[in-house]
């Protein structure tokens, strides 16, 4: 805008100067000259098309001739300036600069903890909605401007700042809030493993103690990430294989894990069990196929691989060819197999392989990989027994770690308790919540979070069963199941009613949403805790307690 403004200023200056130099006549017919102020005032309302008339007295012909010339000059000047301004507003670089300035200002003003989500693809969007539902703030950085624009139309409860930029540039990460004191974690969720590695490296070097969760499907990249600090690396291929192994020998544990990871409102998954003996046939020996083959063979299962390329060391276990050809399927002896895995990176290929395999052997246990969200209805119609959707699996894993850290610890330690114990927990949850999971929450027995329980906890006779009673009828237990008790570094899975509580204990519970509200009342209101813990009914108001002489013992 420098040239248009210079032209406009020059036109105004010349016009004003000309008016001051050209002589006029006053009412008495005497020669007079217009002052600079009057000349500038006249040009201001004339050039802006307001037009108050000739002041301070009618103009002479010479003045009117000069004014006519300046009118045309100012029209040309304004047209040039306004046209340049409109062109500038449409310039992509200018709009990006304005957006960057607005984004920087918004992030700088954040006064509450937030997470930096790098990569707003399918995984980032799923995770963003889940985090927003529990009130967690986050900032988005993505290379695609179209994805960032989606933030303006998504129905988030809070404003979500978004920046379109290269996450592989450390400067861009700094602008996005990496160095902000309120940034409490970085999530590297792009589709490019190299970019995720750069994000993990930058965070480890700039903010060494900042938690980092990174997504990758490459074991080599995962190893390089762990060379920088201790990031949490989520590999969907590894996790699917681990889940399948858990489902093979502990189906109830896998069912409980899947239910809790799906979040509040999720329906209880069907208790399916993959075959633990017999031959499996796997199509596609890429990264996913290699990892899954290792996991299946670790369980003692025989695996036959169908792939277009031969692999060294697998000559006796690989069938080279196109799996869609009947002759290739026949060489894999699919009619004698018990399990089939369609693990290519093409959804159309995987669906056709599943259809062909079921024609040969309808009793097969089918596992598959879904690569695109748009293919979900087709895989649902196919009735696949185990489906890997990498974006959804990564989102669930990270949500479990961020929403309630105790839940992540529970899911990690739970399989060691055995399948029968997991089946009992599922039955207790089903009795309390039905087939749809209720709330999963954590309570901390500190003076700040549980002020009404302080004296009771210090008695060293505080039983968990006494705390989990209804404030309306203490003879009835709360509709909640304690999953984990955390005390310092000690973890107690599935604590029973006789477990003794202590100050600063953390308890992970799952149950009906009303139980969460009732337990909060017990922890924060002295009158409610007095009834729940001792059975005594006392007034809730301080004055009425003094008048009646009934004071809570738990205060």
Image (spheres, rainbow, N blue to C red):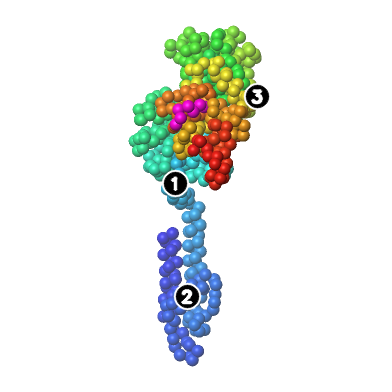
- Would you say 538 lies left or right of 454 here? right
Q: Classify 10 Å Cα crowding around label 3: few (below 14), some (14-19), many (20 and above).
A: few
Q: Residue 198 at x, y = what percent?
A: 39, 34
Magenta region includes residue 70: no
Local SS, label 2: helix
**Quarter where residue 167 is shown:** top left
Given residues 122 and 242, the one toward you in this image is: 242
Provide residue 293's location: percent of width, then percent of height: 49, 15
Q: Residue 381 carries which label?
A: 3
Eye-nearest disc, 3 or 2: 3
Corner quadrant of residue 232: top left
Q: Give the residue number, with chain letter if any, for mark 1.
A: 111
Q: Is the magenta stretch mostly helix, strand or loop?
A: loop
Question: Residue 547 location in percent, x, y?
Answer: 56, 45
At a point 51% along the width and 75% down the height, the residue shown is 68
Q: Nearer the viewer, residue 63 or 353?
A: 353
User: In this view, which residue lies farthest toward the bottom?
Assistant: 28
> Taking 205 as reference, is 331 left or right?
right
Magenta span has 460?
yes
Q: Mark 2 points at which residue?
A: 41
- Disc sitting over residue 386 in the figure: none
- Distance CA(mark 2)–CA(mark 1): 48 Å
Q: What stretch is highlighted in magenta?
A: 458-464
The residue carrying pointer 2 sits among few (fewer than 14), some (14 to 19) or many (20 or more) residues within 10 Å by Cα, namely: few
């Amino acid at each position: 805008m420098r040239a248009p403004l210079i032209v406009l200023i020059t036109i105004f200056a010349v016009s004003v100067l000309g008016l001051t130099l050209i002589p006029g006549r006053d009412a008495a017919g005497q020669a007079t000259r217009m002052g600079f102020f009057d000349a500038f005032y006249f040009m201001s309302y004339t050039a802006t098309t307001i037009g108050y008339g000739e002041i301070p007295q009618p103009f002479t012909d010479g003045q009117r001739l000069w004014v006519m010339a300046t009118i045309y000059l100012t029209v040309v000047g304004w047209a040039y300036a306004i046209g340049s301004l409109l062109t500038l507003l449409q310039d992509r670089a200018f709009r990006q600069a304005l957006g960057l300035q607005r984004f920087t200002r918004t992030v700088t003003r954040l006064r509450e903890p937030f997470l930096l989500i790098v990569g707003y693809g399918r995984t980032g969007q799923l995770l963003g909605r889940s985090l927003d539902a529990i009130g967690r703030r986050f900032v988005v950085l993505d290379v695609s401007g179209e994805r960032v624009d989606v933030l303006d139309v998504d129905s988030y409860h809070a404003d979500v700042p978004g920046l379109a930029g290269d996450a592989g540039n450390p400067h861009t990460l700094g602008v996005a809030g990496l160095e902000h004191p309120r940034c409490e974690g970085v999530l590297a969720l792009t589709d490019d493993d190299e970019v995720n590695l750069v994000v993990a490296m930058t965070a480890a070097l700039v903010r060494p103690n900042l938690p980092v969760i990174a997504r990758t499907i490459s074991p080599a990249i995962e190893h390089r990430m762990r060379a920088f600090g201790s990031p949490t690396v989520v590999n969907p291929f590894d996790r699917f294989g681990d889940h399948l192994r858990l489902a093979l020998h502990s189906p109830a544990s896998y069912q409980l894990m899947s239910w809790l990871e799906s979040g509040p409102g999720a329906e209880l998954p069907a208790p399916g069990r993959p075959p633990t003996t017999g031959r499996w046939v796997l199509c596609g020996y890429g990264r996913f196929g290699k990892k899954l083959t290792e996991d299946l063979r670790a369980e003692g299962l025989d695996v036959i691989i169908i792939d277009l390329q031969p692999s060294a060391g697998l000559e006796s276990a690989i069938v080279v060819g196109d799996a869609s050809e009947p002759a290739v399927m026949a060489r894999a002896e699919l009619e004698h197999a018990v399990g089939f895995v369609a693990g290519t990176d093409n959804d159309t290929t995987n669906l056709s392989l599943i259809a062909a395999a079921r024609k040969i052997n309808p009793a097969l246990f089918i596992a598959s990989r879904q690569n695109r969200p748009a293919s979900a209805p087709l895989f649902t119609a196919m009735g696949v027994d185990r489906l890997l959707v990498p974006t959804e699996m990564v989102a669930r894993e990270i949500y479990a770690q961020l929403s309630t850290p105790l839940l992540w610890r529970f899911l990690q330690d739970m399989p060691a308790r055995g399948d029968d114990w997991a089946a009992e927990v599922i039955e207790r949850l089903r009795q309390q919540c039905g087939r749809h999971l209720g709330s999963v929450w954590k309570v901390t027995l500190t003076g700040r979070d549980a002020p009404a329980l302080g004296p009771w906890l210090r008695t060293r006779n505080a039983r968990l069963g006494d705390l989990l009673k209804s404030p309306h009828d203490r003879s009835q237990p709360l509709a909640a199941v304690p999953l984990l008790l955390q005390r310092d570094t000690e973890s107690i899975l599935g604590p029973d009613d006789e477990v003794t509580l202590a100050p600063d204990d953390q308890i992970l519970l799952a149950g009906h949403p009303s139980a969460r509200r009732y337990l909060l009342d017990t922890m924060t209101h002295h009158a409610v805790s007095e009834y729940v813990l001792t059975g005594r009914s006392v007034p809730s108001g301080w004055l009425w307690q003094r008048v009646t002489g009934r004071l809570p013992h738990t205060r």
